Amino acid sequence: MAAPRILGGTCRRVSCLEDLFKEMYNCSPSHRVRVPGRVNLIGEHIDYNGLPVFPMALQRAVRIVFRPRNDRMVVLHSSDERFPPVEFEIGPKIERWSQGSWGNYVKAPAKELACRFEIQRGFDGVLQSDIPVAAGLSSSSAIVNAVGLALAHVNDVLADPGEFAGLMAEAELFVGTRGGGMDQAISLGAKDQSAAKISFNPIRLQHVTVPDDWCFIIADSGEVAEKSGSLQFEYNLRRAKCEEAFRVISTNLLKQGITEGLHESYPELCASLDTEILLYFAEKLLPETEHRCFRHVVTEAGRVEAAVERMLAEDIGGFGDYMNASHDSLKTDYQVSTEVLDELVQVARDGGAVGARLTGAGFGGCVVALAERRRTRDVLGALRAEYYERRGRKNQMDERLFIAVPSRGASVHVI
């Protein structure tokens, strides 16, 4: 097999991938799959608690051109030289490679599908992505979804989008990250020019058109936030604290006769009592760290509902206020922001954004800012001058700073 030709940077034209595939495998690919990244507008760290979130899909995406094989092997090359080729045999007993290996995101959907369906065929493929890596824009979940869709197509596996999103969310447990289902649901089910409020158990999408004069801007801090690496413990720790806080609160509410039954989920708990009452009991019953996590979860859930209403009403100022409050909560209560992210948020706000917040898991990665379209240049200019140029990163701005255009969800096509 020929060594991969590195395309360098990003290659947005599918024909580039097709040419590379021909060089690699001495034949033409038969299919292509595209899975977009996503930006979560509001609702951070609550999808894995079963609470609604409000993301939108991006134009930036993972793309794979592929051709079915007649055996159970998967052979996948990346157009980016940072990521070595991946080759393995599909089966329910696939073993994970070392922590941090991108190949685990390729193996994850293969193992999940092999445990659920009769998977007899793999594929040869070439992958390209223009989603910033480890930046909180769901680059890893896009890989999982793209490989999963390719394997499902090759093996004639049929599942509705909600069910498939759930399978792919389960697949990511193979990597070691205990996330929710937001990334999979939005990348598979998004519509053009829309964000989507996503509810869980079961997965449901409420599509909301983004007003024409609203502009979302993404700024990558350059601070790496790799959930499959050293930060995995911190990410999973917060989820565990949320689960413990829920157990303590729901159990004590039942013991004190405030509720008639034991709540089974955060959505049930939040629907049963006003937020102020829940926070009162949280302060009385929980240790400080669990209290902070619980406070973020229940207040962020309220901000999601309110922000959706503000977008429906085309109230950009109100939506921006909820974004700002979300960041403050992520910084102070959930403690996943950094000095760099806080600075980037402030630069965006000072430059004319009505709202700005970290997006994704935190600990680095990206900020999303909202501005009136007429103020877009002002915000971009401030971010360029006050953040990127000051750090000597002028040559990285095309990759790290861009307007987020609401995009459609995943697709598979015959070439």
Image (tube, grey):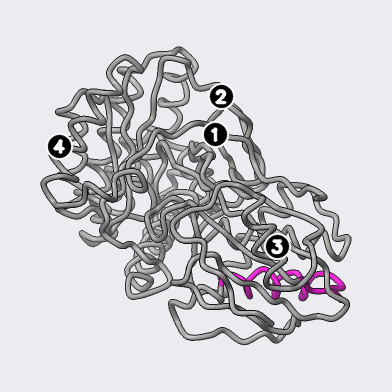
Q: Main secondary structure of the magenta part?
A: helix
Do tag 4 and tag 2 residues touch (Cβ < 8 Å)? Answer: no
- 201 to the left or right of 297: right
- Please tell me whether mark 2 or mark 1 is closer to you in this view: 2
- Please tell me whether mark 3 or mark 1 is closer to you in this view: 3
- Please tell me whether mark 3 or mark 2 is closer to you in this view: 3
Real-space Cα separation, disc 3 to disc 1, in angstroms? 24 Å
Q: Which residue is mark 4?
A: 385
- 298 to the left or right of 117: left
Q: Which residue is mark 3?
A: 148
Q: Which residue is mark 2?
A: 208
Q: Is residue 354 above or below residue 406?
A: above
Amino acid type, label 3: Gly
Amino acid type, label 1: Lys
Looking at the image, tell me whether mark 3 or mark 1 is earlier in sequence order: 3
Q: Mark 3: few, some, or many residues within 10 Å (few <14, many ≥20)? A: many
Real-space Cα separation, disc 3 to disc 4, in angstroms? 41 Å
SS assignment at label 2: strand
Magenta segment boundaries in residue numbering: 105-123
Do tag 2 and tag 1 residues touch (Cβ < 8 Å)? Answer: yes
Q: Which residue is mark 1?
A: 197
- Please tell me whether mark 4 or mark 2 is closer to you in this view: 4
